[in-house]
Amino acid sequence: MTSAIELHGLTKRYKRVEALTDVSLEVPVGSVFGFLGPNGAGKTTALKILAGLTRASSGSATVNGIPVNLAGGHRAEVGYLAQDPRFYGWMTGRQTLEYVARLHAGSGARRSTAELLTLVGLSDAADRRTSTYSGGMRQRLGIAQALAGDARVLLLDEPVAALDPIGRHDVLALMERLRGETTIFYSTHILDDVERVSDHVAILDRGRLVVTAPTADLLRRVAGTSLSLPILGAGDTTDSALAALPGVIEVELTDTTGPERRYRIAVEDGASATVQAAVMHLAASGGLVVATNRQEALDLEAAFLRIVHEERAA
């Protein structure tokens, strides 16, 4: 078996909203798979279907070859972490995992409580009440409880979205350590994290799958450039003027704290020189000063903007 998760035409309708529309993808065994999209794209809905917490309107899904349904036959394969995990504050971390282990009694747990605590870096805090845990510690404990039992697939919903830089670093490092041993399918809207830890990525927009590919292949597929532009004297009208230039995909205002506005502009493939010349013409006609006008390699954020822009324009 090469796919830990398979979705085939997965659709979820609520009364007036179609949260997912005909989503099909495969998640390779042992991969760290980033499920990327803006807030409201349908990522949490897909994860809840895979966790057996809600029913798809149509389509199907499997986890390690076992059909996903509310009967829950696949649940022994799955560990689920909600976006903001909560625990009984009067329990210690160790007691929490022992409690979860009892719920999985008979499922053939691969790791003991002590091993889980070591794996997620909580051995020194194991006997502290969880009410004293930081956000990053709660996320790590949440991953530990998701690994209890015989879970070979982790479903993580925005695991680092609310964490400070230290907490994000710890959780991402843990995900990297689990690569190859456990399949991790996690939702996020933080592109830097996907580029750092994910070997595969799928982009979801307004409930529809836009693209799915190995991360490196995706970057090669949309190979292009972005421009870094600090412009002295720029104002709100400059933002819209830049966005209107032919060849410009997206304009991001990255810094306004200094004497100039700093922009990052994603451009169409092969249009960099044309856009650079147009920027200089715009500056000259408006009495602006362009401090630098240089190209940068296109990263996942620029790729995401380009792919979503092209999909919505289609």
Image (tube, grey):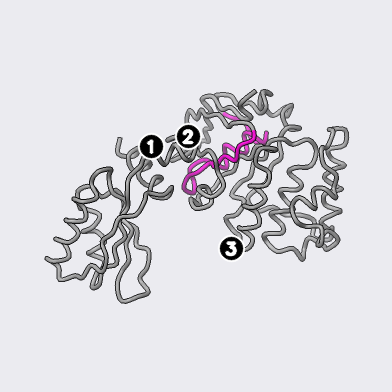
In the figure, residue 306 lies in which quadrant?
top left
* Labels 1 and 3: the sequence-earlier one: 3
Q: Do the residues labelled 1 and 2 touch (CB within 8 Å)?
A: yes
Q: Looking at the image, which is closer to me, 183 or 72?
A: 183
Q: CA separation, marks 1 and 3?
A: 31 Å
On residue 165, the disc is 3
Q: Position of residue 84 (x, y in %)?
A: 65, 53
Secondary element at tag 2 = strand
Crowd class of label 2 (few under 14; some 14 to 19; many from 20; radius 10 Å): some
The residue singled out by tag 1 in the image is 221
| The residue stretch that appears in magenta | 30-56
Q: Which residue is drawn at 27% across and 65% down?
A: 292
| Amino acid type for the residue under numbered disc 1 | Arg
Secondary element at tag 3 = helix
Q: CA separation, marks 3 and 2?
A: 28 Å
On residue 213, the disc is 2
Q: In this view, does 252 lie to the left or right of 143?
A: left
| Amino acid type for the residue under numbered disc 2 | Ala
Task: Give the label, 1 or 3, closer to the camera.
Answer: 1
